[in-house]
Amino acid sequence: MRTLGKADFIIPDWPAPANVKAIQTTRLGGYSAEPYDSFNLGSHVQDDALSVAKNRQLLSDYLPSEPVWLNQVHGVDVIDAAKSMCVQDADASFTKNKNVVCVTMTADCLPVLLCNKQGTAVASIHAGWRSLCDGVIEETIKTMGVKPEDLMAWLGPAIGPDAFEVGGEVREAFIAKDNQAEQAFKAYGDKWLGNLYLIAKQRLNKQSVVEIYGGGECTYSNPSKYFSFRRDGLTGRMVTMIWFE
């Protein structure tokens, strides 16, 4: 029987309260066969359902309860994970209840974790470019109902600024929302390279969140460690989870 070791995932390096727990998975340690090898946690990517179930069972040894899974739709809806019904359409969840696991699923999109300094509220955000542009970070902070200045953030693995190639319409959409986003794009032939990490930091700062950690891991450029939809197309999904005890 396979076991999942701590070397197979990432523990966020941030000064969160001791009762706040978080895990970032990689592609390492699971049962899935190519091209989902090996720790795919997405049930919607045509992987063998039994393999996904076995992978999720491996993960359960490290969690206080079943994660509150979302059907991510690249929008800005935020749910209270403690009141979730089935698998809701949403791109972020938060909780103020102990041992409720908020989870985000990604394979290039930016996962963002939030917690307050009191250790009484946490959130997990799926910040793909559309949801990031449209304000999923801002909506999550508003929905959490805590003082933004009490929050800290951790940015998980995502497609990095040397790999996220986009058309001019994506750049223009971000700048239309916030003109400082212009700093996050550099010309690349007739395209642009976008920096999701920088945009997320800009948006967090505008919400008075200044303690921001992570944001240095590129999924696209590290195929041995991370799934990447942009790189591989048919591939698995990693998860970013947070809860408090």
Image (cartoon, helix red, strand yellow):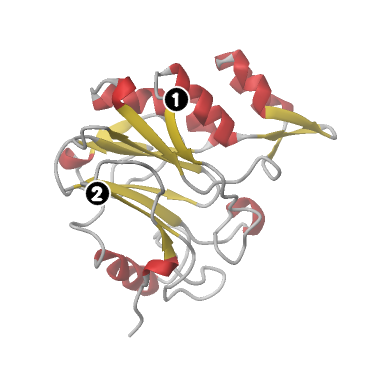
Q: Nearer the viewer, residue 19 or 60?
A: 19
Left or right: where 29 falls relative to 92: right
Q: Residue at x 27, y 20 (%)?
A: 147
Q: Residue at x 33, y 25 (%)?
A: 141
Q: Residue at x 50, y 61 (%)?
A: 236
CA distance separating discs 1 and 2: 22 Å
- Residue 163, percent from left and from top: 69, 45
Vertical placement of residue 32 versus 192, above or below: below
Q: Callout 1, which amino acid?
A: Leu
Q: Callout 2, which amino acid?
A: Val
Ranked by sequence position, the earlier of labels 1 and 2 is 2
Q: Image quadrant of residue 222?
A: bottom right
Vertical placement of residue 18 versus 77, above or below: below
Q: Which residue is mark 2?
A: 101
Q: Which mark is residue 204?
A: 1
- Residue 16, percent from left and from top: 31, 41
- Would residue 90 be visible to someone looking at this image? no
